[in-house]
Amino acid sequence: MMSDKVEIAVIGGTGLYTMPGISDRQVLKLETPWGDPSGEIVVGALQGKRVAFLARHGHGHRLSPSEVPYRANIYALKSLGVRFIISVNACGSLRKDFLPGDIVIPDQLVDHTRRRPAGSFFGRDLVAHISVADPFCETLRRILTHAINSCGARVHSGGTFIIIEGPRFSTRGESRIYRQWGCSIIGMTACPEAFLAREAEIAYASLAHVTDFDVWKDEVVTVEKVMAVMQENLRVIQSGIVAAVEQIGPDTPSHAHTALDDAILVERDQVPADLLAKLGPVVARRFS
């Protein structure tokens, strides 16, 4: 019997604009205090569970990485009751042993963006110092690793994911510096998305699929080359998502689900009522 709750969401990255396996679809157009999400959210049945799908860049890839309404996206998913987000991210490899076509389940993030919209739900009158020492949910990472393994793909569990501003690709000098820093893969969209998910107490992990070697390996990265590899990657990713959804249950634990417990100092009666109303589902558990 399918649950009525929407506890799992998939945020599709470049190339993944629909989720073919979802049946009994319902298309939702939601509004949030931070504007409209990237597009309509599709809710439907997958493995006997209700799952939400959102295309990060919008229909037809309309939004650049710096234009994605990250706060609106996470808020909209939180308002549906989502507790787990599987993020799909195309990435370049900064390591010789991470090959195009491989899947990486990173465990660390380096935020190298500069012009992104505000990366927090919190600020004046309600400050939250969220812990992101381990920015990805370890429970969800294990589930994704097992799921991709079950699909027969080559998967790497762990690695540091550096996020750059985009939409341009790296210079060779930048790419070589990121390698010296110890980064494993490079992309444009996991920040501030992962941090906002943690603030919203949603468990978040990335399925990062390698499309190229960035430019440190004397290659030139082009959209044409990226898309060619991506089409092969997406078949594995879609199968992996189905396998992961099957493993996620209502009792699946995550430290992310109580992330605000140690992040907020102010008492409820000191927070303006209109601010609590604006934050809504993000702080509902903490201030209920």
Image (spheres, rainbow, N blue to C red):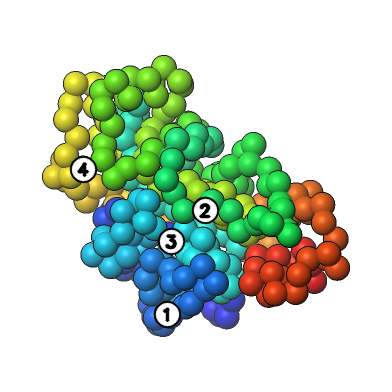
Where residue 42 is drawn, which disc sits there? none
State the residue in front, 195 or 251.
195
Give the amino acid at mark 2: Ala
> Residue 270: x percent and y percent?
83, 64
Task: Name the residue that disc number 4 marks.
Answer: 226
Q: Residue furthest left?
A: 224
Q: Tell me the amino acid under the disc marked 1.
A: Lys
Real-space CA distance between mark 1 and mark 4, rounded to the nearest whole angstrom:
31 Å
Residue 132 visible in the snapshot: yes
Q: Earlier in the sequence, mark 4 or mark 3?
A: 3
Which of labels 1 and 3 is toward the front?
A: 3
**In the picture provided, is 246 more to the left or to the right than 93?**
right
Q: Amino acid at mark 4?
A: Val
Q: Which residue is mark 3?
A: 69
Labels 2, 4: front one: 2
Position of 281 relative to 101 (above/below): below
The residue singled out by tag 2 in the image is 118
Residue situated furthest front in the rendering: 124
Please report whichever mark, 2 or 4, sits nearer to the chain's N-terminal start.
2
The residue where tag 1 is placed is: 29
**Vertical placement of 90 versus 154: above or below?**
below
Q: Identify which residue is drawn at 43% across, 80% down.
A: 28
- Residue drawn at 39 percent across, 24 percent down: 178
Tell me which residue sits at (39%, 58%) in the image: 68
Amino acid, disc 3? Pro
- One can see residue 207 in this view: no
Query: In the rendered structure, which disc, 1 or 3, sits on the residue that comes first in sequence?
Result: 1
Asked if 30 appears above or below 196 in the picture, the reply is below
Residue 76 x, y percent position in the rendering: 52, 70
**Label 1–label 3 contact, CB within 8 A:** no
